[in-house]
Amino acid sequence: MLLEHLKKKQQKLQSKNTDFYTSHGLHVYIKDAIVDDSIDIERVVAQVEEILPSSFLSEVEMILVGDFDEFRDRQISAAYKDGALYVSNVQADESDMVDDIVHEISHSLEEPYGYDLYYDGKLKNEFLHKREQLHQILWANNFKVPKAFFANIEYDEELDNYLLNKVGYDKLTQFCVGLFISAYAPTSLREYFATGFTDFFMEPSGHEYLKRISPVLYKKINDLYDRERLDNP
């Protein structure tokens, strides 16, 4: 009975469309079947296209769904590189998958909108000020991480591993309340932007928290959104 059930499940997975284009011309390819077969990838991508202005999708040529070695090595579930957005086929639910895709789309926008985001140094200064506050919180809680770690705005694997393995995301989440939008936001300046961008679009009716704790970040994202709506009504 179990073998027959597994065969039927595999046939169902194989019968699903594994290669399609959306109405916006986005190419979606499923390399490996999504483990939770209740997740409908077409519905997921449709939600993404509904949430974001179409111009924000212009840098992404293709979404690839599958089991990628890099995900296991880095303990991540999505990545963006050179026009391709990679997302894991292991997802908690459709909302989790939408969140992953929106997050990586934010990284795709850093090249075309990088000047607007970073040129005046305001976002960097806000981020580093929060990093300094987090360092003080960690130090007060007996996590004696070197202050030099927090001065680098780029991704630092050593710092990432320290926060993940030494501090732990449960404790880090508590330390970040009222300071960062999530425990992943302190990782780098790019992730500070990406986590804020994701929150902005995944929580469209709840911007007050982001606006209160990260006013510069909120304004940068909101200005981009307003400009795109005016330019592409």
Image: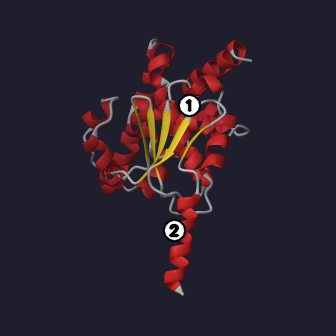
The correct choice, above or below, for 129 with respect to 48 in the image is above
Look at 62% across and 51% down and name the residue there.
95
Relative image position of residue 67 (x, y in whole percent): 40, 54
**Circle 1 SS class:** loop
**Circle 2 residue:** 10
The correct choice, above or below, for 15 with respect to 128 in the image is below
Q: Nearer the viewer, residue 139 or 153?
A: 153
Residue type beneath disc 1: Ser
Relative image position of residue 114 (x, y in whole percent): 46, 18
**Circle 1 residue:** 214
Q: Nearer the viewer, residue 139 or 124?
A: 124
Quadrant in which the N terminus appears: bottom right
Residue 75 horizontal side relative to residue 232, left or right = left
Which label was assigned to residue 55?
none
Dot 2 crowding, Cα within 10 Å, few <14, some 14–19, many 20+: few
Give whichever of discs 1 and 2 has the lower sequence position: 2
Look at 49% across and 30% down and name the residue there.
61
Relative image position of residue 149 (x, y in whole percent): 27, 36
